[in-house]
Image (cartoon, rainbow, N blue to C red):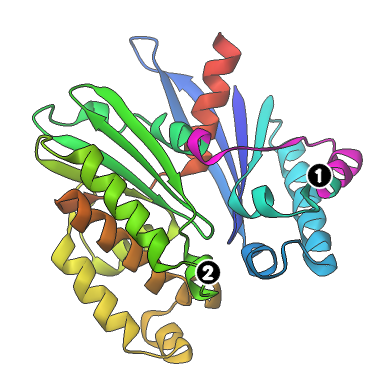
Amino acid sequence: MRLAAIDIGSNAARLLIVEVSYDSKGDPLFNKLNLVRVPLRLGFDVFENGEISKSKRGMILQTMKAYSHLLNAYEVKDVIACATSAMRDATNSADIIRKVKLETGLKIEIISGDLEASIIYENHIAENMDVANSYLYIDVGGGSTELTFFADGKLSFKKSFNIGTIRILKDMVTTDHWDEMKEYIKSATKGQKKMIAIGTGGNINKVFSLSKKKDGKPLSLELLKDYYKELSSFNLEDRMQVYKLRNDRADVIVPALQIYINVMRWADADDIYVPKIGLADGLVQHLYANIHR
């Protein structure tokens, strides 16, 4: 059985296609067949002007048409399509959703920040780790950051903050926003077991690749601080050249590191694991669970 998920974020849209098979115990295995990313960068329109521009509307439609063709080519049985922070804030998102449905048959659902945090948690990474620790999922996007806290074998809290990489680049994140996040994290994690962070999102994946660490090994908070200082010292063009980064990654990776570092400091987490999963992976598992209910 083939399933797919479309994640329309503030920086990029992703299509993930998986083949579902089963292990000897009958538990599902999700094998990636394809992952396609298109840098729509909707947040640069929305967080500044409140709506998605005509040119970006055209890009969304063309992207969704291309995704529709790929879904047909791969003979995907079921698909789930969700949009997050930028589409949540855009005044014309309903019109775009109607247009996409009319021309491609794909139905886009705008999900809340809390639901986004829950779906990311559906990857269940922390369940396979040492119960002697507490775990904090940190998913940093262009428009928001989703935090999901896992302690004593269960989900303890989930929270979304309107602090994202594009919002920072647009000077839309104030001291009050940071203070709210800081106070919430400190209060919610106070007195908990040793904290381990789990980082998701394209930026932390890229930092992990740059670090040359082996899969399964964590990145330390001190290493993230070093990368933040190092990457911040270059202008955008030099950053792209020195680190072989695309333009749409080179500008957001610095504010992303700022967010990860702050969250880890406030949660008193020294290390962060990077399982290279994201919202699209959680969406596929969410879709599979709904099918089997």
Q: Nearer the viewer, residue 230 or 17?
A: 230
Residue 134, image x and y in percent? 17, 35
Q: Is residue 34 visible?
A: yes
| Contact flag, marks 1 and 2 (Cβ < 8 Å) | no
Mark 1 sits on what residue? Answer: 94
Q: Residue furthest right?
A: 102
Q: Is residue 217 visible?
A: no
Q: What segment is highlighted magenta in the picture?
A: 96-115
Q: Is residue 243 left or right of residue 134?
A: right
Q: Could you tell which of marks 1 and 2 lies nearer the N-terminus?
A: 1
Callout 2 environment at 10 Å: few (<14), some (14 to 19), or many (20+)?
some
Q: Using the rendered view, name the quadrant where residue 228 is placed.
A: bottom left
The relative height of residue 18 versus residue 28 in the rendered view (above or below) is below
Residue 181, image x and y in percent? 34, 52
Distance Cα–Cα, label 1 vs label 2: 24 Å
Mark 2 sits on what residue? Answer: 172
Residue in view at x 30 percent, y 33 percent: 125
Quadrant occupied by the C terminus: top right
Residue 199, image x and y in percent? 32, 50
Residue in view at x 68 percent, y 25 percent: 78
Magenta stretch: dominant SS?
A: helix
The relative height of residue 204 versus residue 290 in the rendered view (above or below) is below
Q: Nearer the viewer, residue 16 or 227?
A: 227
Quadrant occupied by the N terminus: top right
Q: Amino acid at mark 2?
A: Met
Q: Using the rendered view, name the quadrant where residue 143 is placed.
A: bottom right
Q: Is residue 93 left or right of residue 161?
A: right
Callout 1 environment at 10 Å: few (<14), some (14 to 19), or many (20+)?
some
